[in-house]
Image (cartoon, grey):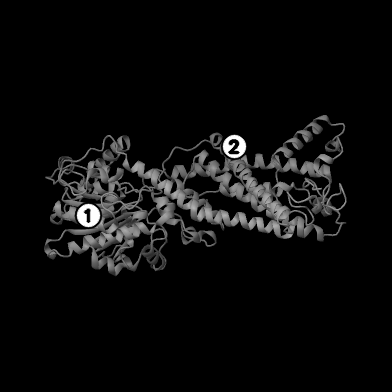
Amino acid sequence: MTTEPPETAQPGNSQPEDDRPDGARSGNSPVPGARSSDASPVSGALPPGDSPAPNSRPAGAHRQGARGNPVLSKVFEVAQTVEHAIRPNYPGVLFAAIFFAWSASPSLLPRTWLFQGLVSGISAVIGYGVGCVVGWAVRKWVLPRLPRELGTLGAVLRPSDRLRRITKLVIVFGVVFGAAAILARSARWQRDLQVLMGMEPTATSSYLRAELVAAATAAVVIFAYRGVRWLVRWISGMLNLDLRIPRAIALPGAVLVVAVVAVLLFQGVLAKAFFSVANSAFSVRNSNTSEFAVQPTSPERSGSPQSLAKWDTLGSEGRWFVSYAPTAERITQVTGKPAREPIRVYAGLESAPDPEAIAKLVVAELDRTRAWERKVLVVVTTTGTGWVDSTTAGSLEYLYGGDTAIAATQYSYLPSVLSFLSDKQKSIESGKTVIHAVHERWAQLPPEQRPKLLVYGESLGSQGSEGAFTGLDDIRSLVDGVLWVGPPNSNRIWTQIEERRDPGTPEILPIYADGLIVRFAGTATDLDRPARPWVEPRVAYLQHASDPIVWWSPDLLFNQPDWLREPRGSDVSRSIRWWPIVTFWQISADLAHAQKVPSGHGHRYGDLVLDGWAAIAQPPDWNPDLAQRIRVALDEDITWEYAHK
């Protein structure tokens, strides 16, 4: 006959079976689904090392030590009922509490109670799994080797039934109230961050709701794991029952089968299916057009009746880019000077069959619009779905009175995060192909007739346009200036410069080669650091100390970064500390809401881009009064866009 795994085994083996790792069962315990001959040879006997199942406990045993105290007796009875229903692993619960506490520690960006609950729930699940493994290891290898008589220590390691029940209650209530205390402290950290970023502080009472969200999240994940474990045990039983494979081999074999199938599915079939479905879903979104995105009639825009890039092929972001731009009249109104109609060229994924054809179409559009006759020509490597920041484009157009041309292309239907995970090489190939194609045509013009050729990229777009160059020397030989905003930590050129920065300069705002060619800025005044010549062509990186996209890296797992050793940025909590694995997880969670903070923090760069363009392109007649008027106009433009896009 087979026996159910016990809830309480020999002293020291008190944890329920359900959350032990597969293979953690007692060495003679049968595999689920095995024949009765595989169980204990004596009918009704238990395998050596196991004790009776919970339902074999004598009636009223749960009230031992509680006689005469009906309240305590009732508490024990309810607790036992709940315990049998959810079958917790108590070392797992303790480790879950520790991981929960880590997840509530300060990070780069403030969080809502809902988001914190999700992050803490996932963290608690990870801790629960670690605790299950640690508890199993102690039961298997530590307790059996301890002498039976250990005095007080023995009472702790091999507690009585009553002490065990009390300990469980203490753990449960301690975790519940401890989590609330931790969240109350976390709410204070959140308020500190919110004040630094000019946000409305959160209330402690509302933040405590994160505990309920965390509990629900953890429960869903744990029960999903138990479903997978049941599948492993079922396969193991079938291997033993049908194929006569010994139990010692059947269980590891079942684990291997499930693991291999999971890896193949998630890395192969499911991954491809997921990104295929996501691509299809976002391609549908790509076909949507805002009611305020109207096909342009001006020949200076792609998608117009005169354009080689048809309106319905530009994609959702492309259609918005060419339809919503400051007109010559608007620019004149802001600057007080005559202006030209800005040129905006765009090619979507459906505008041409492949990246090379898209690049050729962009060059043809630049020829058609006579973009080579403008003062400035910018090649933008977009992010994910083909998005171009309106503030970035508008800033340059206001600065140069509309005497500009901006060219951009779409390389994916997916948002930047999914593009980064599925195929970040696409952005690099797109950036390289388009930039080189435009440069080749630009280089054919007489030097005195060429517009300034500038390159721009934000986030994943910066990584894409970086891919067009081998290094700073290549940049200086090909273009007249570069502005990169919020660069990911994996950017090759950015990383090389950061690693070779001048001694004594911080990672968040490094100085490289005395600022001769490239500079880093988190504010407008940082562009003047150091007070030494900045030769042309100029390269600038805009990066906030609180931007998780800039500072996230796998190295955070086991290496403390310089930006956490050095003085913090002005909007980074002084309470944040580096912990192995913990900091990596915290910054990873911050990525999900990098733009859900006010402008000037996180991944929101706002009109700092205007200052970046002023430093890189050096427009004529640039002065503080003009700068202020343009900032006001940009704020009005982006407010209208948020309300109507």
Q: Residue 212: which numbered mark, if any?
A: 2
| 3D distance between C-alphas at marks 2 and 1 | 53 Å
* Residue at screen point 60% across, 41% down: 220
The label nearer to you, 2 versus 1, is 1
**x%, y% of residue 385?**
34, 48
Q: Quadrant of residue 85?
A: top right
Q: Residue furthest front?
A: 242
Residue 529 visible in this rendered orientation of the protein: no
**Is label 2 in contact with label 1 (beta carbons under 8 Å)?**
no
For the residue pair 91 and 336, the one nearer the viewer reads as 91
Total count of labels: 2
Q: Residue 537: which numbered mark, if any?
A: none
Q: Amino acid at mark 1?
A: Val
* Residue at screen point 72% across, 36% down: 82
User: Would residue 312 appear left or right of 98 to someone viewing this image?
Assistant: left
Residue 154 visible in this rendered orientation of the protein: yes
Q: Identify the element where label 2 is drawn.
A: helix
Q: Residue 362: which numbered mark, if any?
A: 1
User: Would residue 501 appear left or right of 191 to someone viewing this image?
Assistant: left
Q: Residues within 10 Å of mark 1 (few under 14, many from 20)?
A: many
Sequence-first tag of 2 and 1: 2
**x%, y% of residue 252?**
68, 58
* Residue at screen point 57% across, 43% down: 185
Q: Amino acid at mark 2?
A: Leu
For the residue pair 63 and 154, the one nearer the viewer reads as 63
User: Would residue 152 appear left or right of 227 to someone viewing this image?
Assistant: right
**x%, y% of residue 50?**
82, 51
Position of the C terminus, as image quadrant, is top left
* Residue at screen point 35% across, 57% down: 427
Q: Residues within 10 Å of mark 2 (few under 14, many from 20)?
A: some
